[in-house]
Image (tube, helix red, strand yellow):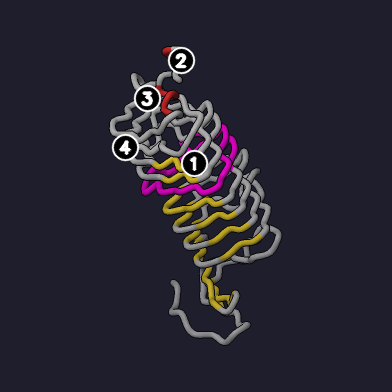
Amino acid sequence: MIGKAFSFPVRSLFWICNPVEVKTTKKAPKQLGAFLFFIPFQNRYFTAMGNYTIDVEFNQITYSADALNLKEFERCVFRNCDFSVCNFIGVTFIDCVFFQCNFTGAKINHVALRTVRFEYCEIKEVNFSMCDKLIFDIAFTDCVLDFSKFYTLKIKGTAFTNCSLIAVDFMSTDLTEVVFDHCDLYRSEFNKAIANKTDFKTSYHYTIDPEKTKVKKAVFSFPEVKGLLFKHDLLIK
């Protein structure tokens, strides 16, 4: 049974019972035992309880394959961290930000991404389609997502800003009201996707077949709109 929280002086460390870990070093945090602790960090306290961590900033950590499995992070920031060898299982991120992190090749099966932002991250060849679909809420800014997959996901209203989306799989994806802001969509696949009210206005290199993709009230601009006519082999001047 977890007791009540108390106030502690700076540099103090106190545990009551039952949770775990948190450490911001260049190596991944290690399990510390069954404790609840309050730790001063940059003039504020953060809490680690069980496999739950809140209000922590992690910097320059290279994570091993199973370092984060079965853990939950809320309102955390990850800067310059490397997740490329991770095989995520049962991990939850809530209101988290990833800044200049590397996810290329990571396996993110059964991961919950709930109001999560990725900024300046490299996320190549990552399959998002196996993520937990409950409250799936993500946004990408200045990220490289080449060869990644969003197959069958519902990502209504998601914003992709200044992203490279080369050969990304959006097949059967619900892209309703998604905003592709200055994105490279070269060879991305939209077959059977729902792209109603989707904003492609400032993006480029896309090829979309309106006979196979729902694009009602989607926004396009000239000359990139010719990507909707690619299969007709027309000359547009």
Measure the C-alpha gap from mark 2 to mark 3.
26 Å
Q: Is residue 6 magenta?
A: no
4 or 2: tag closer to the N-terminus: 4
Residue 99 on image: x %, y %? 58, 55
Q: What stretch is highlighted in magenta?
A: 123-149
Q: Does dot 2 land on a helix, a strand or a loop?
A: loop
**As displayed, is residue 196 above or below residue 139?**
above
Q: In which quarter of the image is residue 226?
A: top left
Say the numbered circle drawn on residue 182. 1
Disc 2: which residue: 235
Mark 4 residue crowding within 10 angstroms, few (<14) / some (14–19) / many (20+): some
Q: What residue type is labelled 3?
A: Lys
Q: What residue type is labelled 2?
A: Leu
Q: Nearer the viewer, residue 221 or 130?
A: 221
Mark 1 residue crowding within 10 angstroms, few (<14) / some (14–19) / many (20+): some
Left or right relative to 18: residue 59: right
Q: Which of marks 3 and 4 is in front?
A: 4
Q: What residue type is labelled 4?
A: Lys
Q: Which amino acid does label 1 sit on?
A: His
Q: Which of 235 and 60 is in front in this view?
A: 235
Q: Nearer the viewer, residue 148 or 224?
A: 224
2 or 3: tag closer to the N-terminus: 3
Say the numbered circle drawn on residue 197. 4
x 65%, y 50%: residue: 82
Measure the C-alpha gap from mark 3 to mark 1.
23 Å
Q: Nearer the viewer, mark 3 or mark 1?
A: 1
Disc 3: which residue: 192
x 46%, y 15%: residue: 235
Q: In which quarter of the image is residue 104?
A: top right
Measure the C-alpha gap from mark 4 to mark 1.
17 Å
x 49%, y 46%: residue: 161
